[in-house]
Image (cartoon, helix red, strand yellow):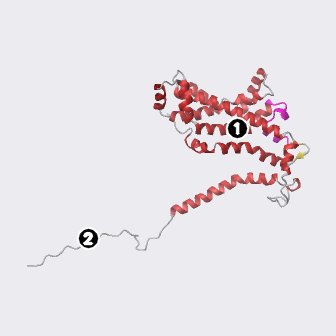
Amino acid sequence: MSELASPRPTVLPVAGPVDGRPERGRPRGTVRHAVSAVLLWLVAGLFLLPLVYTVATSLKPASEVFSVPPTLVGSELRWSNYVDALTYLPFQRFILNGVFVATAGTLITLVTASLSAYAFSRLRWRGRDALFGVFLVTLMIPQEILVVPMFSLMQTFGWVDTYRALIFPWAFTAFGVFLLRQFFLTVPQELSDAAVIDGAGKFRTFWSVMLPLARPSLAVLAVFTFIQYWNSFLWPLVITNTIEDKGTVPLGLSLFFSQQGSQWNLVMAASVVSMVPTVLLLLVLRRHLVSGIATAGLGGR
């Protein structure tokens, strides 16, 4: 009787390279991240280069601003340029005017935009969507076209050369309404229904439920609106007659250029000072900006 053959153990194939050579580690993800980081640093450097040049020029003596060959840092750091820039013109007055106009305009914009966005997103009334479409059409009208009719309207009101003319005409914009409306549409309707069940009215629901949730979007709108007011040049130039009394920062910077020449070291020093309010605003609202930019205006029904 033949002896039974014992079954052979099954050998599973080992996964390996096709060509038989040992597999080598290829950190493709690491290389990709390194290239991305280098590109980001290059782009950031391009954006920071004008700022670095402005700060460096603001500390140079006047005779070394256009020296040949050009240098980034002067022979001495002349901090007195900042004192001269603030005393050469009433620049402190320009900064106070700019802060007041930009702050007041931003607050009014936040109030009007949030109320309008709530009405366009949560309240049901006839012609709502059609009116919102007409409202959005105003975004396609350039500011330069509105300057002449807006000036005539301000002249009718008697607001020429006043702070009211600098603040109110641009405090009612469709951009803020659209931004906040899109955010309100992402909030579940169940939250509003729960507030109504608890006895809250429409305004209480807006104030206690919707507005706290919209803080990131409000922060984004506040930054955009403040910068728009702060950098506005055309409208203050048209509506302001007494620049040294009612002028804002862009108008004050333009006064450094005269027929006698331009003192570029003082212009750069004044420009650096004019950046301080916007930088402080960004630092104060930095916690809400990232989440606000990531979510605001991307949803909606």
Query: Does residue 246 belong to the magenta stretch?
Result: yes
Q: Considering the numbered disc 2 on the image, is that residue within a helix, a strand or a loop?
A: loop
Q: Characterize the magenta stretch by its predominant secondary structure.
A: helix
Quadrant where the N terminus sits is: bottom left
- Residue at image position (12%, 78%) is 3
| Residue at left offset 74%, top offset 33% | 101
Asked whether residue 233 appears in the rendered view, the answer is no
Looking at the rendering, the stretch of residues picked out in magenta corresponds to: 239-255
**Residue reaching furthest to the front:** 198
Quadrant assignment, res 94: top right
Q: Judge whether residue 23 is colored magenta.
A: no
Visible residue check, residue 117:
yes
Vertical comparison of 142 with 34: above or below: above
Q: Marks 1 and 2: in contact by CB < 8 Å?
A: no
Q: Position of residue 139 (x, y in %)?
A: 64, 32
N-terminal of the pair, mark 2 or mark 1, is 2
Query: Within 10 angstroms of label 1, few (less than 14), some, or many (20 or more) residues?
Result: some
- Please name the amino acid that badge 2 sits on: Thr
Left or right: where 53 falls relative to 115: right
Q: Secondary structure at mark 1?
A: helix
Residue 105 at x, y = what percent?
A: 70, 32
Residue at 63%, 28% (x, y): give it: 112
Query: How far apart are labels 2 and 1 at the CA level?
Result: 75 Å
Q: Give coordinates of residue 284: x percent, y percent.
A: 66, 43
For label 2, count other residues whose C-alpha is less than 10 Å away and answer few (under 14), some (14-19) or many (20+). Answer: few
For badge 1, the amino acid type reads: Gln
Q: Quadrant of residue 127?
A: top right
Total tally of numbered discs in the picture: 2
- From the image, tell me which residue sits under label 2: 10
* Residue named by callout 1: 228
In this view of the protein, which residue sits in the foreground, 262 or 73?
A: 73
Tell me which residue sits at (85%, 45%) in the image: 85
